[in-house]
Amino acid sequence: MTIAKKWLWVVVVVLLVLQVAQVLFVVHRASPTWDEGDHMFAAYMMAHTGDYGLNPEHPPLVKFLAALPLIGRDLWVPTMQNRDFKVEAYMCGRDWLARNDGDRNQLVFQMRLAAGLLALAFTLTVFFAAREWFGDWAGLVALTLAVFDPTIVAHSALVTTDIAVSLFFLASVYAFYRYVKQPTVPRLLLAGVVAGLLLAAKHSGILLAPMLVLLIGWELIVAPKGTRRRLALRLSGAFAAIVVIGVAVLWAFYGFRYAARPAGLVLSTSLADYVRPLSHFNAAAIMAIAHWHLLPESYLMGLVDVKRMAQYYPTFIFGKVLSHGVWWYFPVVILVKATLGLLALTALSFFAIFTGALRKGRELAYLLVPAFFYLAVAIAAGMDIGARHLMPALTFVFILAAAGITALAAKNKRWAWIGGALILAHVVSALVVYPNSMAYANEAWGGPKNTHKLLSDANVDWAQQLYQVKAWQDRHPGEECWFSYFAYPVLDPAVYGILCHPLPNAITGWIGGAENTAPVATGSVLLSAGDLSGCEWPSNRVNPVAQFQSLEPTESIDDAVFVYHGSFQLKQAAAMSRAQNAYALMEKGKKPEALALAREAVAIDPDEINSQMALGDIAAASGLKDDARSAWQAAIATAKQMEPDAQAGYIPDLEAKLKKL
C-alpha cells in the first residue's frame, strides 16, 4: 500500500525538522569531544595550507566539510614543535581551540553544523533506499528509526567520521544496486564517485570492495546459467571501473599530491618507520603501494594507524578491563545500545523472511551481505571501543527492520498495530534519555545510569560534559575538587572555568601535563566514566581511581561524570602523577630532580607499577644500577599480580632491561 505523495513528503519534512532540532540542541550543549580538537585544527590547516600530515589517521572529507565556515578567516595558529604527529595535532588543536574559541563554543558549533549536513544526507539516503526497495511505508519507518536512534543522534553533528562512513557505505551499496538493476553509464559513474566519497570519509571504506565482490557473487549465483558468463564480465568491468573512479576521487581530496605535508615539511615519523610493528606481509604491501604512489602518503599512514591501534587497544566490558579484544564485544554492544523496539523489529524482520512474508531476494542480499560482513570484520578486528564503530551496519538494520514489519503488516493488519507499538517504543526510549543520548542503554540493562558499568568510551563518555561540570561547580562555590577528566590534557577544563585539580590518567602519561596530586583529597572528586572504568589501561590494577568503582557516587552529571563527596586516599594517583612528571623532567635533562620525584612516588605508593618503572628507568639512566635493578624487580612482582594477558605488556620489557644491566 502506498501513501499519497503529498502526505508522504509532509511526514518526511516533519521528521527531518525533528532530526535537526534534536541534533542542534545536543551539539550546542556539548563541549568538544575527545577527538574533535584534533580534527578541527587539522581541518583548518588542511584547508589553508594543504597540510594532510597533522591528522593522517582520518581521511579528509569530513575535515574539508567542517572547514567550510572557516574559509577566508585568518585564525591564530600555534607554533609547530615537530612532535609526534598525533601529539602535535592533539595539543595544537587544544591550544588553537582555546585561543580562537575559548569556552564560547561558537567556532566549534559552526564546524559541527557544517559536518552535520552529512546527517541529513544520511537519513535521506536511508529513506530513499528503503522506499525504492520496499515501498513508501518502509521508507517512512526506516527514516523514523534513524531520526530518533540515540547513537545516531549523539554522533550526528560531531566533527568525526562515523556518520560520514555510515552514509557513504549505504549510498555506495545503493548506487551499485541501482546500476546492477539498470546498467547505464551515468549510474556506473555515480557508483564510482560515491565509492570515492566513502574512501575519503574513513579508512574502513576499503571494506566496500569485498562487499561488492560478495554481492557480485550473489548476482552470479541467482542468474540463469546461460547469462552468467556475460554478467560476470559486465559486473567485473563495473567493479574495476568503480575502483578506478573511487581511487581518483580519493586522490582529488588530497589535491593529487602524494606527500602528506607541503614542501619543506615532513612527517614526524616516516611511513617506513611507522609500518615496522606490522606483520611482514602487511608492511611489505603498504610499502609497495607507497613505492608506486598508488595511494597518497597520508592515506597510507592512516591505514597503518588502524592496524597498529587494533593490536594493543584494551577492552572494557561488564565492569572488567581486558588487555585485548573479545569476539562477543560487539554483539553485547548491540543488545545494550539498541532500543528494545529496534531489536524486536529486527527479530520480526527475520521472522518475516523465514515465513515468506518478505521475499525480495536481491534487496535483502544488498542489506544482509554488507551488514553481516561489516559486523564480522568489526568482531575480528579486536578494536572494541564503541557502538559508533557499528553505525555502518546499523544503517542497514534500520531498513531491514522497516522492511520486515511493513511486509508483515501487508499480510495482516494486526502486525501494523504491533509494529506501531514497537516504533513508538523506540522513539519514547530515545526521547526519555534525550539529550544525554551518548550514554544510552536500553531498559533491559537499567538505562543510561548503568551504561558506565557495562561499556566505556563513546558508549558513555567522550569527554563532552564540560559545560555541565562548570554548572556543577557554579552550584558549589568555593568547594575544593579533584577532576579525573577523560580527555585531559587534550582538552583543558580550565579553559571552561573549571578550577578542580586535575588527576592523572593514561593520556597524561602519554603527553604529559599531570599535576602532583595530594595523597589525600577532602572535598569533591569528579570522575569521568572513561577514567572511572579504566578503559585506557591494560589492567584495572593500573587505574589510579579504581577504588571509586565500589563506591556509590553522591551525584551524577549526564550519567557520565560521577561526583564523590568526602575525604579520600589518593595514594595511587599521587604516586602516578609524580612518576609521569619524573619522566617529563628526565626528558628535559633534569636527572637529579627526576630521580628525587620518582623516589617520592615509590615512597607514597610502593605498589604503583608506573612509579617503580620510572624509578628503575631514571636510576639506570643516572648510572645507579642497583637501584634500577631493585625497582624493576619490584615492578615485575607487581605485574605478576595482573591478569595474564596484561602481564605481557610489562614483564618482557622489564626482563629485557634487567638483562642489559
Image (spheres, helix red, strand yellow):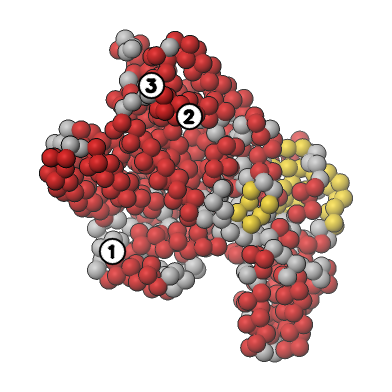
Question: Which of 33/235 is in front?
Answer: 235
Q: Quadrant of the N terminus?
A: top left
Identify the residue position indicated by label 1 in the image.
258
Callout 3 environment at 10 Å: few (<14), some (14 to 19), or many (20+)?
some
Q: Is residue 154 visible?
A: no
Looking at the rendered structure, the kind of residue marked 1 is Tyr
Q: Is 422 above or below relative to 625? A: above
Give the Cα distance between marks 1 and 3.
52 Å
Q: Residue 551, image x and y in percent? A: 81, 45
Q: Residue 634, image x and y in percent? A: 77, 76
- Left/right placement of residue 447 relative to residue 4 reads right
Identify the residue position indicated by label 2 in the image.
346
To which quarter of the image does residue 406 belong? top left
Q: Is 453 above or below relative to 403? A: below
Residue 543: mark in rendering:
none
Q: Quadrant of the C terminus?
A: bottom right
Callout 1 environment at 10 Å: few (<14), some (14 to 19), or many (20+)?
some
Give the Cα distance between marks 3 and 2.
14 Å
Residue 357: mark in rendering:
3
Q: Specify which label sits upstream in the sequence, 1 or 3.
A: 1
